[in-house]
Image (spheres, coloured by chain):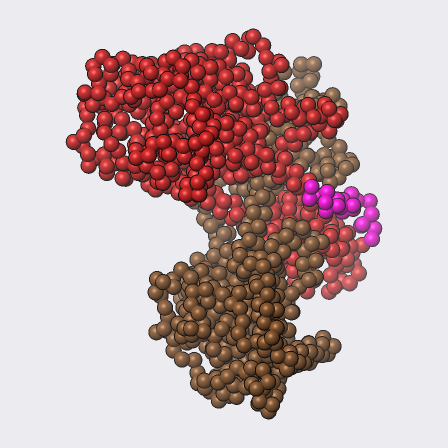
Chain colours: A red, B brown
């Protein structure tokens, strides 16, 4: 028996699939490019404007302060002032602590909260972000740059390399922003970040054992095993006084969090608690001459604003590779944290923030920062959350913080000389514990095993090897997962839901019934080289299965492919469809297409595939396809019984 | 106004989306695993069998010869005999030529057609494949191993490294097969192979200039620039006699192809033509004492079968890395060519071949081959095509070829001493020209620009740098493409096609009409971390656009997400949907889900998402969703006007 034809009358009076006028390849290419790199269509307003107006709104787009400054009010200023002061009090102890974590002079930790916030105030598009240094990146830089130059032996060079790394990061971030490559940051999944942050928190806390136990020197390693081994092989150096003070401070800080949890309007208590701990600690250390009882102190802090460091940037080839590595990796981390924080806070206020614009802002502040003795800065979660709670309205709160910090640098810096390391350790420890999100990991485990694995890979990678390995393995796994999903799309057989003209997955809806003489498959996206041979064999196996059960469903005459879900197809994919068609032609089984999407239809037309299967065999809905097939089947039966 | 509720009566008497009894996480995990690694479900017959029967059909599955041998008939044998002899005549000149291409002793090229075919005859599941050495891989191995050890200075070590590389490849291939990693080979797209083969053909032809021009020595480089530079800086060494003979032979070979094109049943003419060229050339060289006129000859070939080489395999750490590299890359190439060829020939006979089983067969023959002085063998296209034309029926044709080759090795080998290099060069040149597929590249250009770029990357990478670079760049591009398609799925707005209850992309079907108060978006697969933030912002922008045009469509109350095309979702994706829901809740816009697929529904349930939006707001079809929304809208209007 020949392959069944579709009777003429059946071809009239039905909605046709739009196969006419495919867009020019340029047009489609352009729209793809646009969706890829300008998904947020930043210039959509410009189209309707005159040259001058367009230019000025373009500048506005580039420099957000021009957007909000004109509408700035006294009321807003009042809230920003409060927020700014609050985060300033947090910035002092955090800055010093994280600078020490990076083995940098404590005062550098104060510098980072003076210059960068000013720059961010101008270019930043997030109204909630508070900028500063972060623990994870500080430790990462310390371990990367420390592997090249020792902080103890050559402190100046070490410091300058930090500034240079910040410069690299800045350039990298600006480049990403300008070339609209925010897409790269998308490849750091939440699972990865959760695991990475958790792991980092653990190893950072491990580093704090130095301060809490009052050890004189410490291992340069970061992985748990070697740190613990070091600590327990130096029990003789432990100082009970230091431990005691540390435990008290940690208790105090937790108490402050507890207070806020009970009485939300006391949000400022946990915010100023760290400063309190620093001051208390300082006074205490001063009174009891802590130094003599193993309570080590920060030591002298130079008065005065950030010294110019632009002349000290080291571009020597000897350090280039390590700086590049440090710059790129820490840049990725900084961006992912900063942008994630900015986004999640913006969501709470129904605001949108533009990832690419943020990248440029981060980049600018790191470049300029690197000229004024600042190392890598981003939008730390803790600080930004406080800023948000304190009711900030615009990026002005960063400017306020910066001014406060200026005053501190000019007048108060020396006072922090007596700050005991143990109080800094206490502050870091408490901050870090907040970053370990058990319940989130548990949620991942419940919802998606693979995500859980990705998360754990980052976590254990960081804990037992190092931060970069942890990150790489985890990102690698996520990419493999994405590729797997491309390589193994799931085709499913559709059946008719009794009493409707709806066709659904028979596995999902067991009461669906198959249609005699027809096999309806729903293809899923994308049909690519990576899954072409798989899909072909899968389809042919479906057909064999159908034919083996032919006795009950009648001989198979039609393969109906529902392409509704296929958003993109490549030439290998089309080749696969072609082979399937040829193969089935020999078995007198007709291939019928349903609802190909725009891009797909275009390619199928230009590849002459539609022409081959015949335009009349392309339908708008499964239902139409089925009825048409029924019809032509009866026709043929009446003709040759 | 509050968010609209769905009136009770509306919730009865409608088909529900199946959200009940999600499969156990183990079950779903297992099925995913199965689809990923056992897509062809090789053991599907075993389930219904008793232990013994199962075991024996398992063995049958592993050793295909047990499947076809019992059903082997004399008729089949006759066809196989003819085919076997034909490919043997082709195997001699090809084997010698490619061995020379790899700077190996010519006789090694005969060895590879003796042992491996026997092994393949046992394990091979393809009935059309003819095994042997291939030009591309020979050249690749030569350049890789040659970089470590010079063939001229240390021929024995060089040769043994080839055998060891073959051993590595074999182990690698078997491993891939056993662990069902055929999926890896899927990532070599056709575009890549087309470009790579074309480029290789060019550089292989370049290598033939040595033979054709009668040059004494030649550059070890493969890229076009340095080869041409070398050739034209040694014009003094060119020998016109050699060129003349070469041109004649090339003409002869093309003629033979022409004959077959005209008279298809003379398929054997082009098949034996190479042997003819070798014999003619040999006689000619013998008569005119070619050596004296710059027509170089192959030189003495040792009589006798493959010497044992298992004791010469070199696992010394010094060569390990280069051998591993050579083994893996050439393994990938060999597999991709062999499996591609096997598949395409099988398609023509409506046969299925199992990629993973083929890998094991290739692996076995390379491992055993490496013990008997054979270097990497696979299923070359030219040989297999001849085998197919000659009407082979089973893998027996390989066995026949192997027996012919044994006779040649035992008795005739020395006769090939006088084979002129120029005739080998002619044979290779003609064979290679067949591998350059302009029209295919042009087709790619027409159908898919990106595929064309991938193809060209491989082509020019091979020509101007080296084979590995070309391959890597091209594969890299294909992977990036696959990732891009995950990172930028295209959401589209659906509208109703007048006079039907079908909803389609308004961009594709301009006559579609939007529904007032509702925005219907078709999500596309997959919803992953890589596109979560993109999708969220895209959706929110759709909504802003809707609201800005609210005056005409009425205020927006419903966002209807058609999930029909989404085959998989991860936790970040669910998080994204969650944020969208929360965001819209504040704007009193209700999120409505349509037709979530099995896996997706499961995850949404276990993530409590369904619970949150309310099960009554999940519909089976867009149409139902729309009518339900209409209904509740009217309800609410009648209640509070």
Residue A425 figure quarter: top left
The answer to if A9 sits in the magenta stretch is: yes
Identify which residue is drawn at 68% across, 34% down: B493
* Residue B266 position (above or below residue A446): below
Quadrant into which the N terminus of chain B falls: top right
Asked if residue A297 lies in the magenta stretch, the reply is: no
Q: Residue at x 27, y 29 (%)?
A: A209
**Residue shown at the point (50%, 30%) measured from the top left:** A367
Q: Position of residue A226 (x, y in %)?
A: 27, 39
Quadrant for residue B558, please give it: top right
**Whole-percent x, y for residue A443 in the image:** 43, 33
Q: Nearer the viewer, residue B162 or B26?
A: B162
Side (left or right) of A397 relative to A554: left
Instruction: Give the quadrant of residue A418.
Output: top left
Q: Residue at x 67, y 29 (%)?
A: A43
Q: Nearer the viewer, residue B88 or B107?
A: B107
Question: Is residue B64 shown above or below A483?
Answer: below
């Amino acid at each position: 028996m020949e392959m069944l034809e579709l009777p003429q009358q059946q071809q009239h009076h039905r909605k046709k699939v739009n196969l006419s006028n495919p867009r020019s390849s340029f047009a489609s290419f352009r729209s793809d490019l646009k969706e890829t790199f300008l998904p947020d269509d930043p210039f959509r307003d410009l189209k309707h404007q005159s040259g001058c107006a367009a230019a000025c709104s373009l500048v506005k787009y580039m420099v957000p302060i021009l957007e909000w400054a004109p509408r700035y009010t006294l009321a807003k200023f009042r809230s920003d002032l409060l927020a700014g002061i609050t985060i300033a009090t947090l910035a002092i102890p955090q800055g010093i602590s994280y600078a020490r974590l990076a083995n940098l002079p404590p005062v550098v930790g104060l510098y980072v909260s003076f210059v960068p916030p000013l720059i961010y105030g101008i270019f930043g598009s997030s109204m909630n972000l508070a900028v500063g240094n972060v623990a994870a990146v500080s430790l990462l830089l310390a371990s990367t740059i420390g592997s090249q130059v020792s902080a103890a032996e050559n402190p100046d060079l070490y410091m300058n390399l930090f500034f240079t790394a910040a410069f690299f990061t800045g350039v990298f971030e600006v480049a990403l922003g300008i070339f609209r490559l925010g897409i790269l940051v998308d490849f750091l999944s939440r699972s990865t970040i959760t695991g990475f942050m958790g792991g980092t928190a653990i190893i950072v806390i491990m580093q704090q054992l130095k301060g809490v136990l009052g050890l004189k020197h410490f291992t340069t390693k970061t992985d748990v095993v070697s740190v613990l081994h070091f600590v327990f092989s130096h029990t003789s150096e432990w100082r009970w006084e230091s431990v005691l003070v540390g435990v008290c401070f940690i208790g105090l800080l937790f108490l402050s969090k507890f207070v806020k949890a009970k009485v939300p309007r006391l949000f400022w208590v946990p915010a100023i608690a760290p400063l309190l701990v620093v001051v208390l600690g300082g006074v205490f250390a001063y009174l009891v001459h802590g130094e003599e009882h193993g309570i080590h102190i920060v030591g002298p802090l130079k008065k005065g604003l950030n010294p110019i460091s632009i002349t000290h940037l080291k571009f020597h080839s000897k350090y280039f590779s390590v700086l590049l590595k440090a710059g790129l990796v820490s840049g990725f981390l900084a961006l992912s944290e900063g942008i994630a924080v900015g986004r999640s806070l913006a969501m709470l206020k129904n605001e949108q923030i533009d990832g690419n614009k943020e990248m440029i802002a981060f980049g600018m502040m790191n470049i300029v920062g690197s000229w004024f003795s600042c190392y890598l800065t981003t939008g730390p979660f803790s600080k930004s959350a406080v800023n948000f709670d304190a009711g900030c309205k615009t990026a002005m709160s960063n400017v306020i913080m910066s001014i406060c910090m200026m005053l501190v640098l000019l007048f108060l810096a020396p006072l922090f000389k007596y700050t005991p390391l143990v109080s800094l350790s206490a502050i870091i420890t408490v901050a870090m514990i907040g970053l370990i999100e058990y319940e989130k990991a548990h949620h991942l485990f419940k919802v998606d095993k693979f995500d859980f694995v990705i998360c754990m890979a980052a976590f254990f990678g960081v804990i037992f090897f190092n931060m970069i390995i942890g990150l790489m393995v985890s990102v690698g796994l996520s990419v493999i997962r994405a590729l797997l999903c491309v390589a193994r799309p799931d085709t499913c057989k559709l059946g008719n839901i009794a009493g409707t003209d709806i066709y659904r997955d028979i596995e999902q809806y067991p009461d669906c019934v198959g249609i005699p003489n027809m096999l309806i498959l729903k293809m899923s996206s994308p049909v690519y080289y990576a899954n072409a041979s798989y899909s072909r064999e899968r389809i042919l196996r479906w057909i064999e299965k159908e034919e083996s059960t032919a006795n009950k469903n009648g001989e198979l005459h039609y393969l109906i492919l529902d392409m509704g879900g296929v958003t993109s197809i490549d030439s290998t994919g089309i080749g696969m469809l072609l082979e399937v068609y040829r193969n089935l032609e020999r078995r007198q089984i007709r291939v019928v297409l349903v609802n190909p999407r725009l891009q797909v239809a275009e390619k199928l037309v230009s590849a002459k595939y539609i022409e081959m299967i015949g335009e009349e065999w392309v339908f708008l809905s499964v239902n139409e396809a089925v009825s048409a097939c029924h019809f032509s089947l009866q026709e043929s039966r009446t003709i040759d019984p």
